[in-house]
Image: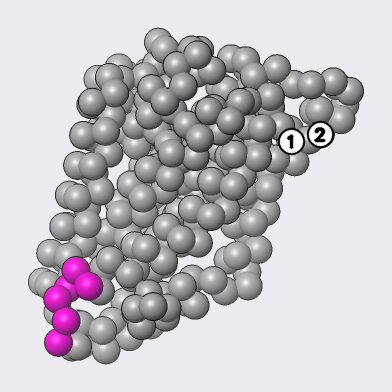
Amino acid sequence: MDPILQLSIRQLSGKWRVTLIAVLAALPVALMLFIKLVAGEEIEFNADFINVTLSGMVIGAVLPIVLITLSTASLGNEVENRTLGFLITKPVPRYRIVLPKVLAAVVIGGSFIVASAVASTFIGGGSVQAAIAVAAGVAIGVIAYSTILTWAGLLTSRAIGFAIVYVLLWEGAISSFLGGARYVSVRAYVLSIMHELDKDSFAPLSDGVIEWPAAVVGAAAVIVVFFWLTVLRLRRMDVQ
């Protein structure tokens, strides 16, 4: 394993952080189990489940919050602790520093969030195909948010505040009401990928998703652009 990746995973997998992530990831599953227990019957995989549990809770809340706790700290903590200088003085390309930092957040956060989303889908009456669609869409969302928030953590010491405003205002409010904004929304990419991979199960999303090619290209562009911006920022930083 790459030494920087190994170090980054160890830094981000502190007890309090992993506990918080585990609790957040468990919330949708616990909610579905509670509903199933109270209802005393199988839950229908319908519009209410998709909009409230998957789109609203897992993708709209748990996914970005988990990545905020991880990705803003990935390089942000190095700056705050004044240890970034030890990394950038090494004779390695800057992308080989950024990539392990992004991957560490993806590995830790992705494992919890994808598992939560898939488990919620099955408990909610979803098929195997629906679970695969959810896993694929959420995985793309994890990578996209990780690159954006890793860049934010390197850009400013107030990255958490910036990330919360971005998620609540842009991803949560503006992109939900303005159709054009969905073309530059990670949440819209995730939902569109899910819908494309299983159009029957996710038919209730039909009116709110963007075209499949636009979602794929948009997600890829976000990942590449923000990864490049992070590398560029790291090259230009004057670290004492």
* Horizontal arrangement in the rendering, residue 6 relative to residue 16 (left or right): left
Q: Position of residue 34 (x, y in %)?
A: 81, 34
Q: Is residue 50 magenta?
A: no
Which amino acid type is marked by label 1? Leu
* Residue 140 sits in quarter: top left
Tell me which residue sits at (65%, 40%) in the image: 119
Which label belongs to residue 34? Answer: 2
Q: Is residue 92 magenta?
A: yes
Q: Position of residue 69 (x, y in %)?
A: 48, 59
Which amino acid type is marked by label 2? Phe
**Figure quadrant of the C terminus:** bottom left
Tell me which residue sits at (22%, 73%) in the image: 96
SS under mark 2 = helix
| C-alpha span from label 2 to label 1 | 5 Å
* Residue 88 sits in quarter: bottom left
* Horizontal arrangement in the rendering, residue 232 relative to residue 120 (left or right): left
The secondary structure that most of the magenta stretch takes on is loop
Tell me which residue sits at (57%, 74%) in the image: 14
Kindly check if marks 2 and 1 are in contact, taking CB atoms under 8 A apart as contact.
yes
Q: Which residue is mark 1?
A: 31
* Horizontal arrangement in the rendering, residue 124 relative to residue 91 (left or right): right
